[in-house]
Image (cartoon, grey):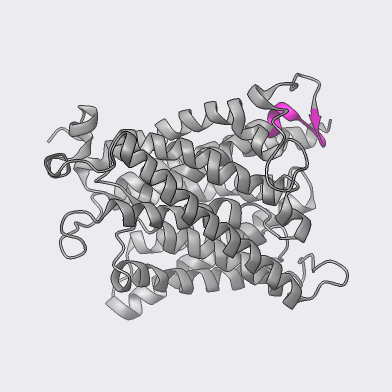
Amino acid sequence: MSGADTAWILTSTALVLLMTLPGLGLFYAGLVQAKNALSVLMHCIAIACLASVLWFVVGYSIAFSGDGAWLGNFDRLFLAGIDRETLSGTLPESLFAMFQMTFAIITPALMVGAFVERIKFGAVMMISALWLLIVYAPTVHWVWGGGWLAEMGVIDFAGGIVVHVTAGVSAAVIAIMLGSRKGFPERVLPPHAPWMVMIGASLLWVGWFGFNAGSAVAADQNAGMAMLVTHLSAATASLVWVVIEKVKFGKPSLVGLVTGTIAGLATITPASGSVGPLGGVILGLAGGFICYFAVDLVKHKMNIDDSLDVLAVHGVGGATGTLLVAFLAGVGSGGTGLGEGVTAGSQFVVQATGVIAVGIWSVVATVVIVLVTKAVVGLRASEDEETEGLDFAHHGESAYKL
């Protein structure tokens, strides 16, 4: 065991949990109407609790036990065999399991943004549970657990495919099957608390250092470079969003800036272990531009009420970084380059295979999960509940004393 590595991953684990609680919760809660703010916070913290227990029972074993191409071998059901002396590399395996648990928490929580203000609480819980075990955990095994995509040599340092493509694609499927909010897109109200959105995004930005630099699973040079390029990409994409809004509307918005921040963070995630500082800036530029126009495409051209832009920001951003790493790993100083005999073209094919295969699996599995959930607990809040707001209708509480 390495004391230095263990100390850093202990810190990273806390940072990644901070991303969901309270970062993502505040980010999403500020974007909805005041009457639905508590429901979003409830979704995030309830998913965190549910995902934690499922990860203990079976999720970790599906993802990280055995060397099968498709699934783990279930040797770690209920975290069996993990004691105080068990190691995973240079870390206590208890810590590695906990670090990965925080990823399993935030990934289904990301999807909440696509179906806010109109979904039953029971449906959120059932979809999240099934999705974690059927979509997320197997994908983790494919990419990080020695599965078939790992064997192909796919590069996904911290979750462009595993986290952002899965969550973004599945979120859009759920939004389509659930239907739009009343009045979408003409009468959807603006965010009720932009200041809250900024605080949530800031916590996400800080937490993302644990997400990306922690994925080095060591206190080393790779962690340092991952932290640097993560920050540069986020800052660059934020400025891209500001410039676009200034040119288009004459006034850059706070919500727009921090949405650009999240786009830059999502885009650098898969590449953060492979690119140098110049690559980080280029990915920030690409993620900022591509995700901005993806928001318009999804909402206004495709008419999908992905309420808080999960597909356009996370799905598209994660896919963009996953594909571009094939060309940017060797750009400038600090990049790792590609393996011996691997060309940018051949690596791009591997990256595209990962994005497409995981995207297709996410669509198919999510459709089935939503249909099962609809049959068992129902999906959509009633029209009266949607009008009243989900805070009081579903939880008997209100975010504000009005």
Q: 197 left or right of 91?
A: left
The residue positioned 52% from the left and 64% from the top of the image is 317
> Residue 252, percent across and down?
33, 69
Q: 177 left or right of 20?
A: left
> Residue 259, percent across and down?
41, 60
Q: State whether residue 94 is above or below residue 297.
A: above
Magenta segment, which residues? 87-96
Q: 200 left or right of 336?
A: left
Where is the N terminus found, in terms of image quarters? Answer: top right
Q: Nearer the viewer, residue 36 or 192?
A: 36
Where is the C terminus found, in terms of image quarters? Answer: top left
Q: Is residue 62 visible?
A: yes
Q: Residue furthest top?
A: 84
Q: Nearer the viewer, residue 249 or 107?
A: 107
Q: Is residue 11 visible?
A: no
The residue positioned 60% from the left and 42% from the top of the image is 137
> Residue 153, percent across and down?
76, 60
The residue positioned 24% from the left and 29% from the top of the image is 395
> Residue 368, percent across and down?
43, 47
